[in-house]
Amino acid sequence: MNNFRLKRRIRALSFYVRQARVVAKALKSPRHPISAHIIPIRRCNLSCDYCNEYDSFSEAVPLAEMLRRVDRLATLGTTIITLSGGEPLLHPQLDEIIRRIRCHGIIATLITNGYFLTPDRIKRLNAVGLDHLQISVDNVLPDEVSKKSLKVLDKKLQWLAQYAEFQVSINCVIGAPVHKPEDAVVVARRARELGLVTTVGIIHDGSGQLQPLSERHREAYEQVVSLGPKSFATFAYYNQFQKNLVCGLPNDWHCHAGSRYLYVCENGLVHYCSQQRGYPGIPLEDYTSEHLEREYDSVKPCAPFCTISCVHQVAMIDQLRENPVEALARFFPPKEPNAPFALPFGVSILAWFFPPETKGMPKGPARTLLAAAAMRILGIR
Ligand code: SF4
Ligand code: SF4
């Protein structure tokens, strides 16, 4: 094992502890943003057919402005900040932005099309403390829909496997615009071969909504999921939300975008998500705890067929906080009637330590003491 891979394994341990801290803080407090996306540049070097989140001309947001936005998100209590675009690696001072996120103790993640990755660029991302990087690989060979292709990106994936000290996940997409859903299985196999984590995302339409999936798409989805590790780090991805959507079924849930999840566009406005721009459309510098409070409860009519998985994931934490028994039954349905919940190990631990007080799950004195100790260890008072 080379030095970089060894460091990636060591850093993974600290990353898992910090993720546990994010979940524990979210279970304890309902009114801070768990996760925020910020856009350092809307320009992209590619033009994927299904994408409405880019242009070919925007300038990078000035560094001082980006740092102010990061500081403001930190003041609001944000625990994870994801940089996306456009193509964020086109921002000339991206490293400074990542460094500032990490200075606040916030988890820093990056979504990129990977075209600008080189061994040197990966090492610079190591040096500034990036926690996680995601690349979407849409097909095996470039076509008119997408050039994010395994043929073009395989070398980049090899470099990531060799040099990255941060966590890397390869996102395979499934959905109507993708001509060959079987490509997702090839991509997932290659990622596993390289020792990288795979996730699978469902492509949405221009308002974040589900496009009907064919039988071929559904089969490819199941195969990609079966290739992924069943660990705590990935449990949220393979969730009941996606399982329903793949079958064309709506989800019954409350979207807390604008509160637990924020999307901050290149102009510094807070939107619910990339597909619901304009709501609430308030400048981040004016966004307050009253806005977070209000948007926690606001009803989003687009929720039933929403495919925005990062918002599903934060909603799962809130479902667990508000009604743990029902949430666990919903997330991890028993394989047979009357069998216990099929909880991943890490989730069992967190659920044991941090359940809110409910009639269904009373805490005894020993458990209260242990939970308090765990809170101290995780740095949450
Ligand atoms: S690479 Fe990403 S941001 Fe650029 S066009 Fe494709 S999906 Fe959109
Ligand atoms: S339900 Fe929420 S995350 Fe999904 S599209 Fe609507 S506002 Fe966005």
Image (cartoon, helix red, strand yellow):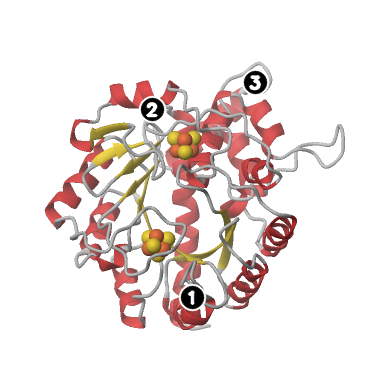
* Local crowd size for mark 1, using a 10 Å CA cut-off: few (<14), some (14–19), many (≥20): few
Which mark's residue is nearer the viewer, 2 or 1?
2
- Residue with the mark numbered 3: 362
**Where 78 falls versus 175 (above or below)?**
above
Callout 2–callout 1 Cβ contact below 8 Å: no
- Residue with the mark numbered 1: 6
Does the residue tagged 1 have its C-beta within 8 Å of any atom of ligand 1?
no
Instruction: Give SS at disc 3.
Output: loop
Q: Position of residue 78 (x, y in %)?
A: 34, 40
**Where 147 falls versus 313 (above or below)?**
below
Q: Which image quadrant is residue 99 in? A: bottom left
Task: Give the amino acid at mark 1.
Answer: Leu
Residue furthest right in the image: 337
Q: Is residue 212 left or right of residue 282?
A: right
Residue furthest top in the image: 359
- Residue with the mark numbered 2: 31
